[in-house]
Image (tube, rainbow, N blue to C red):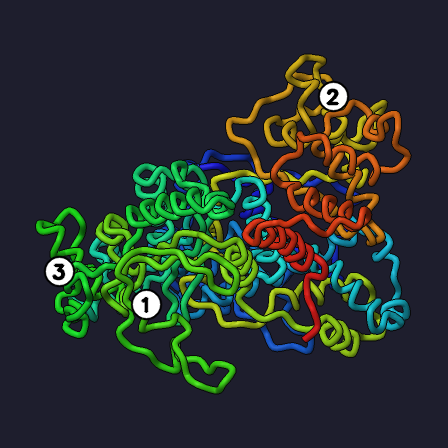
Amino acid sequence: MMHDTDPEVEEEMPRPELDVDVDLMDTSTFVPVLAPKLSEQETIKESVKERQSKSRTEQVVPWPKNGEAPINEFTTEGYISCAFPTLFPSGEGDFVAPRHHTVTAGNYFKHLMMYGDGNFARHPRFRYFALNTEMRWRALQTGRIYLNKHPRDARLTLGDLRDMVGREGECFANRVLHFASSLRGTSQYWFKQRNRLISMIDTLGMPTLFITQSAADGQWPELARLICPSGKEHCSSSRNRAVSENPAIADWFFYHRIDKFMEAFYVDTLGAVDYWYRFEWQHRGSPHVHGVVWLGDAPDIEKLLSTKDDVELLDAVDEVTTYVDGLVSTMNPAISIDGSNSDNAPLPKTKPHVCNKSYAEVKDIHMDLIDLLSTCQRHTRCSTAYCLKKNKKGELVCRFHYPKDLEPVTRIITKDGEPTLLTQRNDPLLNNYNPIQMSSWRGNGDMQVVASRTRLIKYCAKYAAKPEPHSKALKSTYGKIMKNLKDDGNSLKMVQKLMISSVGERDFSAQETCHLLLQIPLYRASRDFFVLSLDGSRELQHRLEEGNELTMDTILDHYCARPNTTLFNSMNLYNFSQSYRTPKRVGDDLIHRKKQVVVIVRPICSPDPSGPKYEQYCRQKLMLHQPFRQIEDLLGATCDTYPDAYSIFLRSGSVPPSLADDVLRLEAAERENHGDNTSEVSFMTFQYHVSLYYLHCVRLLLIFPVFTPK
């Protein structure tokens, strides 16, 4: 498992500093005496002796007194312990209590959620209080960090903020909220992950599978043994009650189960070379994952179906359908092959539930698969609360398109100009499945082979990494905050309020709340991600020393100073960034990565030749894909502009597949200039390149702007 170079569970930030009036002791006239440091064992013994020496009447929790000044959650000692006296019976362990070492809010609440007796994790209200507190404090601290990195915005006065109406105010709010992508679970966070997923597809090509794995947390016997009272593991009501009372353990169990399942089934059994998946929670609280998987032996469906020769096309279709039949199925083994008795398909097996049986206990694999399919994979009931939605004609239709037509064989059709796979089907209500997947996971799942780039784009943009709440219009958000901002307000308060608004008001299930508090990742990827900035920006040194440069060396500096060998002379910047870690100083030995990373290029410029940033776009593409030692070398000896140099590069024959849409655009422009309209491009090839262009447009829309008005 690779870990993100920009960690998804980031370093916890300390408690935010607010503008509060606090009486500070004058410490300029004395030197404080630090308490002697004791070992952990000695500290525990001293604490036990102190507790035993006190009488019961002396252990009194100080209760806050009524007064005109409200309690301050950042400075009032005992604020949390007084709010939850049953969880802090002795009044000790409060977050604001004095301690030898600084504790961050995230680590504090994570420790309490993992406390041995489980009282904090099981408390019906504490977990929501903890999540609300941590997210607000993170938002406030992120606001301070934003102003430290954007000094121009930090100098804005209240009058300047009020003058920012319309588009200017939206741009300001956009900058602030884009910076909030580090706040886990927010819309900005998922926009960032969505862009990373699209970059991963750009790098690795089309994935092989869409996957979904849902939790059967009320049925799995392994989970029941962890949380159910002894002797009641097989009682359905006891299992459901235990899951409801132990959401932290249930969510933790699902996270580790899917992690092991990805390695055991998708990687070891199917031969997956890469994957990406995210966690999501249903309204009832149970988790599931959506994701995409790249299989090593999968045929290139897109390339096969774009052939012009009819004989080759038939062979390609046969190769694809044979591969699909060996991977996924919609055939119900309990009914006839022609589906004539599909109305008599077996009923779900729920007494006892088939998922109560672990895979090790299965004796008849064939009958077990039939029970699993009838219970977990058949769409047996449509309802307005779940799948029935009104179409454009006002008719109620199932959004999953059930019941589906029977198919005698697996075939490929063209639907809306895109290739669509129809697998052999004898059951109109059966969902896609893989037999090994169903038998080992023992819960609802889905597996579909990716055949269309357009549908892949829709999946990435609207489904796989979608944010939970709907985005609010920036104009209304900025205006509402300005209306409520007091006369003594400043840019800090405005930024912090915008950050808090990014957290959003939505429903959090108990398991999702515990997932966030336990700092469990919200997504997993088999690749690291690396941001390659080509706008000339540099990062400041964290520790400045006399005689050193103020800024850090960039990967561009390391690339230009790479060793003068045959390997490195022919290596472009893109491959260099994928394959090597850079040391702190230029000239030191480069570190080869064990696995290539996904490179995310910034800034993103439009490929439109008539656009204002086309010069920068061409310059970036040349920097990425043409080897150089100095940027001026990219123009060569005959070109004065980067678009001219880029046109020559596109005609060179050494263009990577990711630039195929630029080649097509250049050829079309040249035909138009020469008045040649006789050249024909196959429909499938045209669709392929158009979809590549759409993919680029989607990426632009996902980043600029972060929010769009309703």
Helix, strand or loop status at disc 2 = loop
Is 639 left or right of 707, judged from the image as shown? right
The location of residue 17, given as percent across then percent down, is 70, 56
Within 10 Å of the Cα at label 2, are there few (<14), some (14-19), or many (20+) other Cα atoms? some
Q: Which mark is residue 244?
A: 1
Question: In percent of the image, x 73 and y 29: which residue is there?
Answer: 626
Residues tagged 2 and 1 counted as in contact (Cβ below 8 A): no
The answer to whether residue 233 is left or right of residue 650 is left
Location of residue 487 in the rendering, given as x and y in whole percent from the top left corner? 85, 74
Amino acid found under the numbered disc labelled 1: Ser
The quadrant of the picture occupied by the N terminus is: top left
Find residue 299 and report its image quarter.
Answer: top left
Q: CA distance from mark 2 to mark 1?
A: 56 Å
Q: Which residue occupies 45% across, 50% down?
A: 292
Q: Residue at x 76, y 47 (%)?
A: 671
Indicate the position of residue 206 as horizontal and vertical percent values.
Answer: 50, 46
Mark drawn on residue 586: 2
Q: Which of marks 3 and 2 precedes in the sequence?
A: 3
The answer to whether residue 22 shows anywhere in this view is no
Q: The residue under label 3 is which amino acid type?
A: Gly
**Cα distance in 3D space between marks 2 and 3:** 65 Å
